[in-house]
Amino acid sequence: MYAVLGAPADASESQLKAAYEARLADLEREEATDPGPVARDAIRAARSRVEEAWEILSDPKQRLRYDLLIAMEERPAPVDPAPAATPGPAGTPGPAPVHHDQPVPVAPDPQAPPPTHHLPPPPPPTDPRRPPHSGECQLCGSTPATHLEFRRETGLLLVRQRRLVEGSYCRDCGLSLFRETTDKTLMTGWWGFISFFVNWLTIARNVAGRLAIRNLAAPTPNPDVNAPLPAPLDPGKPLFRRFGPYVVVLIAFAVFALFAFAGDPEPTIEPGEEVGTCLDLSTDLQRIEDVVPCDGDEDATVISVIALDQSCPSATIRFQNDEQAFCLRLS
């Protein structure tokens, strides 16, 4: 996983993120050169491996499990310590001290046991297990599994960022990935002009992936498979118990309030129908409330239309718009 991102095993979280983003940028540059179909498939497979490595290493619990698994696989075999020198029998002087500056020959002791030759330790046994095959979860090696795609959308005003998680996953691993990517998409996918509309399609595709694992049986681990994780991922909390869906509720409420509580436009007098039009005015007689029938309940009646630089006769009030003015007689 670390080699896929190009980061050391002791990398910090910020170093892992920088390596992940740099790797994605390299793949995007390669894809931008318009390679052939074979190279394009290889780039997509590499991107999938990078996304998978980031999903595991960016989560502290998954990274700890992965590091423990790697440490267990790379643990060296114990080495037997060399035996201590055997002293001579009673009354027999022990071996003469050896001075490193001048070698001293020592006669062999006929009563000493034969020397013991220590062979080098055997190499550690190779793992007989195989990597996950088709139909097996590429994270935990369990069966049954199916091919899934989940996307995580991030809106950045005029641009957007998408992360694709693609591969063969069991029910629990797929459910965990669906909930994680969809929750983040619901929280961060709306904050851009393009992303606001594209985000609906991303959510629909994630839901389609969720439906694909609905009928999968409980995952069964396979001891013959050497997978990155020793057990399926914990699916975690249901989506409705996470923060993302409530962001959608708040956005919907804000849009509804914008249209529901927006003030009605001020009534206007249509050209050609000015003279004789009856109106309802505000209490302070400074604003036209509505155009109403002339049935005796109106507040004022338009008696003439004048130019903007003209004034109205006495006992009338004057209203104007951008083009002309009106003289109103109060009822």
Image (spheres, helix red, strand yellow):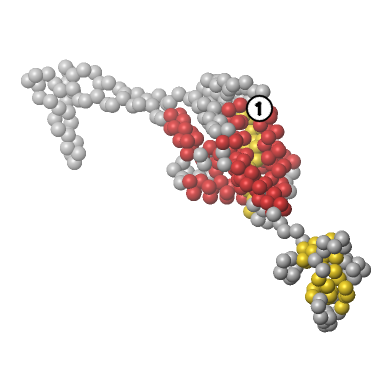
Left or right of residue 275: residue 183: left
| 74 or 283: nearer the viewer | 283
x%, y% of residue 251?
Answer: 65, 48
Q: Quadrant of the C terminus?
A: bottom right
Question: Can residue 5 be spotted in the picture?
Answer: yes
Question: Can residue 185 be spotted in the picture?
Answer: no
Left or right of residue 103: residue 38: right
| 282 or 177: nearer the viewer | 282
Q: Taking 233 as reference, is 297 above or below it? A: below
Residue corresponding to mark 1: 213
x%, y% of residue 233?
Answer: 54, 30
| 322 or 50: nearer the viewer | 322
| 297 or 197: nearer the viewer | 297
Measuring 16% from the left and 17% from the top, which residue is drawn there? 111
| Picture quadrant where residue 125 is located | top left
Measuring 19% from the left and 36% from the top, which residue is drawn there? 103
Q: Residue furthest left?
A: 91
Q: Residue furthest right?
A: 272
Mark 1 neighbour class, 10 Å CA radius: few under 14, some 14 to 19, many 20 or more? many
x%, y% of residue 256?
Answer: 70, 49
x%, y% of residue 113?
Answer: 21, 17
Measuring 9% from the left and 19% from the top, which residue is drawn there? 90
